[in-house]
Amino acid sequence: MRTIDTNLGDLITIFYDEFIELYGDAELASVAAAAVINDLLHGATRFDEHALEEAA
């Protein structure tokens, strides 16, 4: 399996850059990047909770 070392700051920058290119608006890009990061973090939390339930 291939792994990639990255951190939250890298992801925020990547998403922000992509959204600024897509929308051409800094505020909209910022909100969109925050929404995507929140969704990813929420999904990771749900995955962790599900894994803990299966392990019990």
Image (spheres, rainbow, N blue to C red):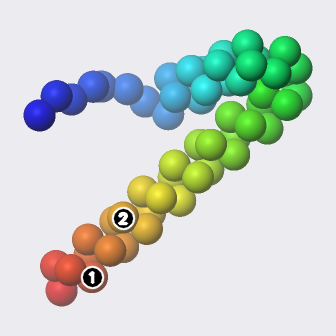
Residue placed at 78% from the left, 31% from the top? 30
Above/below status of 41 relative to 8: below
**Where in the figure is residue 9, as x and y percent of width and height?**
54, 27
User: Are the two marked residues, 1 and 2, in contact with CB atoms closer than 8 angstroms?
Assistant: no
Tell whether 22 sits left or right of 52.
right
Sequence-first disc among 1 and 2:
2
Quarter location, residue 12 = top right
Nearer the observer, 33 or 22: 22
Q: Quadrant of the N terminus?
A: top left
Above/below status of 31 relative to 7: below
Q: Residues within 10 Å of mark 2 (few under 14, many from 20)?
A: few
Mark 1 to mark 2 CA distance (whole Å):
10 Å
What amino acid is labelled 2 in the image?
Answer: Phe
Q: Secondary structure at mark 1?
A: helix
Tell whether 56 sits left or right of 25.
left
On the image, numbered disc 2 is attached to which residue?
47
**Where in the figure is residue 15, as x and y percent of width and height?**
61, 26
What amino acid is labelled 1 in the image?
Answer: Glu
Residue placed at 88% from the left, 20% from the top? 25
Q: Residues within 10 Å of mark 1 (few under 14, many from 20)?
A: few
**Where in the figure is residue 20, as x and y percent of width and height?**
76, 18
Nearer the observer, 46 or 8: 46
Residue placed at 43% from the left, 30% from the top? 7
On the image, numbered disc 1 is attached to which residue?
53
Tell whether 51 sits left or right of 34.
left
Determine which of the numbered discs, if any, sits on residue 25 in the image.
none
